Image (cartoon, rainbow, N blue to C red):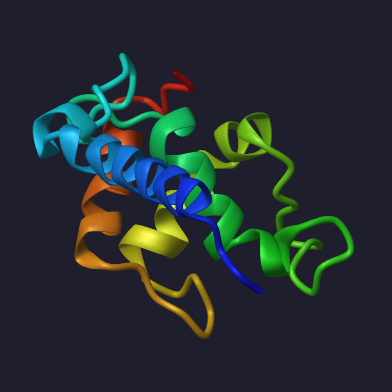
Amino acid sequence: MKVTKKKSLYTLAVLASFIAVLYSCSKDQAVEPEKPGNEEVTAENVSYSNFAGALFQTKCAGCHAAGGGASGRWTFSGFASVRDNGARINNVVLVTGTMPVGGSLSANEKALLKAWFDRNMPEQ
C-alpha cells in the first residue's frame, strides 16, 4: 500500500502534537492537589471514618461478621457495634494481644488504634 506524502505529514503532525502535549506538563503541574480531609492520619486526628473502620473491616470482619466463626462473641456490623464493645475490643487487641487470631497489627496500627480508644472512639 502506497502512503501519500500528505497522509505522512498529517500522521507526523498528530504524533508531534501528542508528544508536545505529553511533555508540556511539568511534574509540579501533574501533581494532584491535596483535597480537604485527605490528610495523614495521626494520633491527634484518628477516627473511625479515617482509620478504625477500615482496620476493623480488614482485620476483624473475616471472623466477626454475621455468620462468621467468631460472631458469637462479637459481631462486627459497623461503628455502633465497635463503640458498644469498645472495652472488650481494646482488651483483646491492645492489652492481651489475643486478637486478631492468626494475624497481627503493625506497630503503627496499634498506636493509632490506641490513640483512637484514648480519644473516646470518635466516628468522624
Answer above or below: position of 62 versus 77: below
Q: Position of residue 4 (x, y in %)?
A: 54, 56
Query: Residue 82 lies in what quarter of the image?
Result: top right
Give the mark count: 0
Observer-nearest residue: 18 or 120? 18
Answer above or below: position of 33 versus 10: above
Left or right of 95, for residue 61:
right
Observer-nearest residue: 86 or 50? 50
Which residue is farthest right?
67
Q: Position of residue 74 (x, y in %)?
A: 71, 55
Which residue is farthest bottom?
102
Left or right of 112, for residue 104:
right
Observer-nearest residue: 41 or 13? 13
Q: Position of residue 103 (x, y in %)?
A: 46, 80
Q: Quadrant of the C terminus?
A: top left
Task: Name the residue rendered at 53%, 64% in the picture.
Answer: 59
Which residue is farthest top?
36
Task: Name the residue rendered at 69%, 67% in the picture.
Answer: 62
Query: Residue 85 lies in what quarter of the image?
Result: top right
Q: Quadrant of the N terminus?
A: bottom right
Task: Name the residue rendered at 79%, 74% in the picture.
Answer: 69
Q: Position of residue 12 (x, y in %)?
A: 37, 50
Answer above or below: position of 99 versus 16: below
Observer-nearest residue: 113 or 13? 13
Task: Name the residue rendered at 27%, 42% in the picture.
Answer: 22
